[in-house]
Structures are given as C-alpha cells and as structure tokens.
Image (spheres, rainbow, N blue to C red):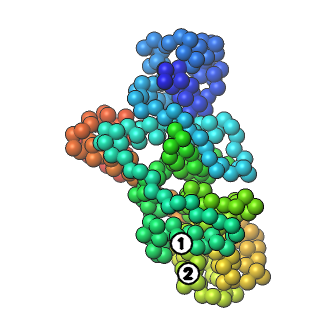
Amino acid sequence: MHIGERIRYGRIKAGLSLRELGEKLGITQTALNNYEKGITTPDSPRLIQLAKALDLPIEYFFRQEPITTLRPSAFRKKVNLKQKELHKIIEDTRDWLERFVTIETILEERREVDLPAPIRITEPREIEDAAVQLRAYWNLGLDPIENLMDILEDHGIKIGLVDASDAFVGMTIRVNDEYPVIVVNRNVSGDRQRLTIAHEIGHLVLDVDPAIDEDKLYHRFAGAFLFPKEQVRKELGEERKRIGLEELCILKHRYGLSMMAILYRAFENGYISPVSFKKIHITFRKNKWHQKEPMRPYLPEEPSSMNLMIMRAYAEGVISRGRANEIFGGDIATVCGCVDCA
C-alpha cells in the first residue's frame, strides 16, 4: 500500500473532498489527486502539513498493519445514511482496526472469532429458541447480560465505536474477507447500543429463509437474546393488563433494553394483549417517550480489550509511552481519567 492510498483514506476519514483538502494545503486539486494516485510523492514537509490538516499522527501514513478490504455486510437498507458519511465511518473503522491489530501483533495475541454453526430459521417463532441456543453456546444461561461488549470481545468479536450522525446506529463490517467486526455509533443511548449490537449478532449466527421479513426478525432476535422469553414470563407474569413506568425502568436497567423494547417482548410473547399494548404504545407516542424515555437513562458501554492490551504492553515495558499513545490514538492517561499515569 503506497502513501497515496493512506492520504486518500485519511482525507475520507476527515470528511473532506479533494477540493477542501487542497484549499487547506494551498495546493491544487490536481496536485492532491496525483498524491493519492501515487503519480507523485509528497516530501516530508508536505506530509507533516497533511497530517496536521487531517488531524492525524504522521505514523498513520506508514503503518505496517494495513487493512486491505472493509466490506459492510447486512447493512440496513432503510437507513438514510449519506455515502460520504458511510465512507467516513469505514475509514474511522480502518484506523481503529489497524491500531488494534498493531497491539495484537506486538503481543502475539489474537482471539479467534467463536460463533456457532449458522442456525436455520424457517419461521419467526423459531427466533426465541435461536437466541437461547446462542446463549447456551456461550455459556451465558438466561440471566441478564451485564456487559454485552465484554461478552463479544471474550469470543473474538471486536467492537468499534465511531462518532456519527443519528442516521447511523451500527453495522457489521467484514475485514479482509476473513472475520467480522461490529461498529456502533458512540453517541446513542446504552439500551439502543446494546439492541443494535444484538441485532448485528443475529446477522452473524442466523441462516434465515428469504421469505421471512428479515429486519423484524433480527430485531426480535436482539430482544430475545437480551431478554429471553422465559425471563419475560418470570419478570412480568403470563397475563398483564398494564405495566407501570417504574416497573419498566427497573427492567430496563436489569436487562439493558429500552422500556419500549421490553413492552414489545411482552407483546410478541403473548404476555400482554394487543389492546393493552396499543394503549401503552399510544401513551409513549403522545408523550414523545419513544424519542427520549422518562427516568434515568441506561449508560453506554465501552469496549476494553484493545486498551487493556496497550496498558499491559506499556506496563511490561514492551512499548514506550509514546508508542502506547500512538496505538491508543491519544493520551493513554485519558483512558480512566488518570492524571499520574506517566
């Protein structure tokens, strides 16, 4: 991979057009295009200028762990996401993955993706059992999952967070046509984040009959994985006419699902009637709780595997403080708000 490709990746990551970056550098669009195509090579002063304009470390242009292909898979067709933002998300993912792979290579430690054989789904009701099957494969039982990202990372599935608009929640990306990673918007609420991740897990483990409405099915799988049917019955009972906000709030923080998602779990499993569900649903819409739920929010999770590996390598003297900062993508002192980590 030549420096020109790295310049192009960095430009897309910054969300800049050729013209916009050219103006920042004081060069023509043609000159910049020649850099990106490898026709000409920028000298050291120009590379430093590029790094500053793109807000990237100079080492970005010389990385030894290139990610050659990133293919979004199972991307939701209804998502109104502009191509420019999608490309930026992909380049943010490339940057994060390259740094992750770098620390894995340094420590000679890489977890293999641990997923069961595809679970065949021919009708929607089979989703409930499929969710329980995955829990059994990962030895999770039926209890609430305290930290979903930790579970996935323990089974070799990397989770990346990116800054994005409300149009993007999350997606699965296949790396070098070899393994999947899940990328999530860091700015969404914790319950929405978890449901999105569980939705993407569904794309990785289910083999769905094409005749079924797939998006609704994966959404149901996500709810069933986080809040299994047996737990819904145990927590709510088999026949409810009304469910109060306080009860929903407790369950939201126990299972990491939105109040509305919990109501859907009760409804789709027959524990609350269509009439009662509709009444509660109308109340949520009327009060705009479907946009921002009442009571305390469920806080987002943070992936930890990469940061732990960086800290271990630094603590053991395998890498310097400067190298640790490069791989982390900032000052490692900010990981836990530490001010005396030198």
Give the farthest residue toward the left: 317
| Numbered tag placed on residue 156 in the rendering | none
**x then y, percent, for residue 43:** 45, 11
**x then y, percent, for residue 334:** 37, 46
Q: Check disc 2 and report its element: helix, strand or loop.
A: helix
As displayed, is residue 257 above or below residue 41? below
Amino acid type at circle 1 is Val
Q: Residue placed at 61% from the left, 52% from the top?
A: 169
Mark 2 closeness class: few <14, some 14–19, many ≥20 residues within 10 Å:
some
**x then y, percent, for residue 197:** 55, 58
**For mark 1, what is the residue?**
132
> Foreground residue, 46 or 149?
149
Q: Quadrant of the C terminus?
A: top left
104 left or right of 167?
left
Query: Which quadrant would residue 35 be assigned to in this image?
Result: top right
Amino acid type at circle 2 is Glu
**For mark 2, what is the residue?**
230
70 left or right of 155?
right
Tag 2 or tag 1, which sits nearer the N-term?
Answer: 1
As displayed, is residue 264 above or below residue 306? below
Q: Residue placed at 61% from the left, 32% from the top?
A: 15
Mark 1 closeness class: few <14, some 14–19, many ≥20 residues within 10 Å:
many
Q: Check disc 1 and report its element: helix, strand or loop.
A: helix
